[in-house]
Each structure stands twice: as C-alpha cells, then as structure tokens.
Image (cartoon, rainbow, N blue to C red):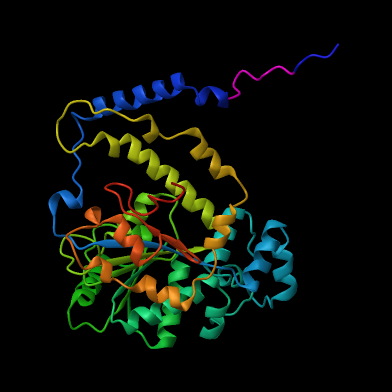
Amino acid sequence: MNRSPKRRRDAPNHEDMNTPTKKMKVMEVVAKLHAILRPFLLRRMKVDVEQMLPRKKEILLYATMTEYQKKFQEHLINRTLEGYLLENVSTGNGFKGKLNNLMIQLRKNCNHPDLLESLYNGSNFYPPVEQIVEQCGKFRLLDRLLSKLFARKHKVLIFSQWTRVLDIMDYYFSEKGFDVCRIDGSVKLDERKRQIKEFNDVSSKYRIFLLSTRAGGLGINLTAADTCILYDSDWNPQMDLQAMDRCHRIGQTKPVHVYRLSTALSVEGRILKRAFSKLKLEHVVIGKGQFKQERSKPSVDVKDVTEEEDLLTLLKDEDSEEDKLVQTDVSDEDLERILDRSDLLVGPSAEDVNTESRVNILPLRGPGWEVVIPTATGGMLSTLNS
C-alpha cells in the first residue's frame, strides 16, 4: 500500500505566502509596527536639513578574476588550497595557517590572493608592485580608476574592512610616490585629528585617505574629498552608507562619486544581494513609516513589503545571463563616461534628478558597471535586483 509522504509540521508553505489573504496580513502587521514606532521615533535625513547639498552618484564597478585568483578559488572550493600552497610556495618560516572558514578565504581571494599566499611564503617583503597589481582583478581596476581620478585632481577616500588590504595599498602608494593618510583601529585619537586636519587643508599634499570601514566610517569629516571608493562591502550595508557619508555630508561643495568595487561572478555578489535584502527590510520597517513628524497612520502598499521570493533569490547559485553580461571588465571608453560628473552640476540634491535625463547621459547598466538610482532611504544598492 503506497502512502503519500507526510509533511513536516514546521515545513514552510510557500504557496500560502503568495495568497492575497497572507499578503494583507503582512501589510497590516507592518502598518501596526509603524503606528507603534511613530510616537517614539523621529528621523531626519540630510535632504531635510540641507537643501543645497551637492548631488551624489553611486556606481558599482565589476572586475573579473585573474587566472591567479581563479586557480586559488578552484582550490578553495575543492578544499585543496592548503596542499597546493605547501607544494608550490616556498614556505621558509611562514605560518602554515588553516583555511577553515571558506567564506572568509573566498573573500580574501577576491580582495587580493596575497592575503592567502603570504601565510605560506615566509617572506617579510612584498613582491614587486607590478605583480601586486596584476595578481588581482580588483587591484587592476583600482589602478586604472585612480590614474584617471588623479589626472582630474580629485581627492579620494578608500575604504576596506581588512587592515591587511590597507597595508597592501599603503605599499602600492609608497611605490608610486604618493603620500597617504590612514585611519584604522590602531590609530590613536590625536593622530586621527592631525591627519584629518592635514587632509582637509586646501594646500595639502595628501590626495588619498585609507580608512578601515568600521574604525573610519563614523564621526569623521573629510569633505575635502569628492570621491569615495569602497574596495569591499560590509555584510551590514549601514556601515558602507556611513563610510560614504564621510565626504557626502553637510559642508561638501562638490558633486560626489561613490565607486563600489566587486569581483564579478564571485562570493561578493552574494554579499551585495544580502545587503540589498537588509536595506529593503529597513525601507519597509523604517523608511515607509516616514518618521519625520507626528502624523496619521499612512497607507501601506503590499508591493512595498518584503516578499519571500526576494530572500529565496539569495540562495541561488547561478546568475542570470544579464548579470553575466554586466559582470565583466569595464572598458577604458566606458570608464571615461562613468567618471564624467557634468550631470551632477545642476540642482541641489540627488533626490530631484530627472531619471530620464540621467539615463540619456549614461545607461544604468553596461558591461562592467551599474549606476545606482538614489532614493530617499535606499542609498547604495537601492536598485539592485529591483
């Protein structure tokens, strides 16, 4: 006698999530949450305080992996990298660390394979700067981007979560002959104040400021810079939003470009999508409540509520064909168009920019880039997967 399998009691019913009744219940819960929070929560955005704040454009730039990185990633996924490094890298007195956390190691490989290799090669010195650049796709993109930014006399903030990545950048800039400022968790308060003052000085020789996302992303005014580069992304998107606000803040007089670097078709894409889901949840819980002043309960559109399929997409292993076309190296010609800021020179803020006119200047997506349309609360990543 054949019996149909018994359903687990705690198994989710995906069909029920899509019914109008279920969506209506979710809508009511969100509306009640807004009503509870409104008497206790007051929120002020920059655009509410300063109407003449210069515009900001946020652009996601992709870099393809080098063959060197692809080989490391293959060994990481197959759990054979440790043996490969021991066999192919001169260990000397190097530390034979264990590569236990696969996610962390894959992210290190995206940022620079030297973060993995240096554990095994026993050398106290960096390889030649040309090798540092050519080994990593994101570093090659950073090298191209900075050369064009410096030619246009821009001052740049570069954020990374990894102090060892900042060490590599410090070495890179010293070999290129650039003086840099740097703030991470080890820099004391007096030294921070001195560097910030020198960087903001009009006659300062410093054009680059290296900062760790967590230590340098709060309470710092660096409006002398008009460009922010996020070398890697934080799992918490609010950390990145705070980081870019070090230069796009009250007191800024020039249009600001934010470039977020991401390794194409890699684990970093999963991080960006997870960050997007968190921003979307924040938009539903806080942004849609419009906590600017005491007011009657606003209506909530069911389309604005976080839906289950948005979260399920985070678990997919494959990318769409459109994603694969976008996630490639950006050409020099397109990079010149991306760096153009002429569309930001008219009007007080990014929120009132006509979307159609912006599209005519630069498409929202292309081979190697995505332009993020700013919203009142979304900021970076507000259009990914939308």
Please determine whether, in this image, residue 1 is positioned above or below residue 87: above
Residue 113 picture quarter: bottom right
Which image quadrant: the N terminus?
Answer: top right
- Across and down, in percent, residue 296 comes to 18, 26
> In the rendered view, does 282 fall on the left or right side of 191?
right
Q: Is residue 330 above or below residue 14?
A: below
Q: Is residue 136 above or below residue 97?
A: below
> Can you tell which quarter of the image residue 370 is in?
bottom left
The verdict on residue 88 being magenta is no
> Looking at the picture, how far across and down is residue 97, in whole percent?
63, 63
Q: Over which residues does the magenta segment extend?
A: 5-12
Q: Is residue 172 visible?
A: yes
Question: Is-magenta flag for residue 9?
Answer: yes
Q: Which residue appears at 73% of the width and 68% of the height?
A: 84
Where does residue 45 sit, x and y in percent of width and height? 20, 48
Q: How many marks?
A: 0
The residue sitting at the right extreme is 1
Residue at 35%, 61% (x, y): give it: 359
In the image, is 64 to the left or to the right of 199? right
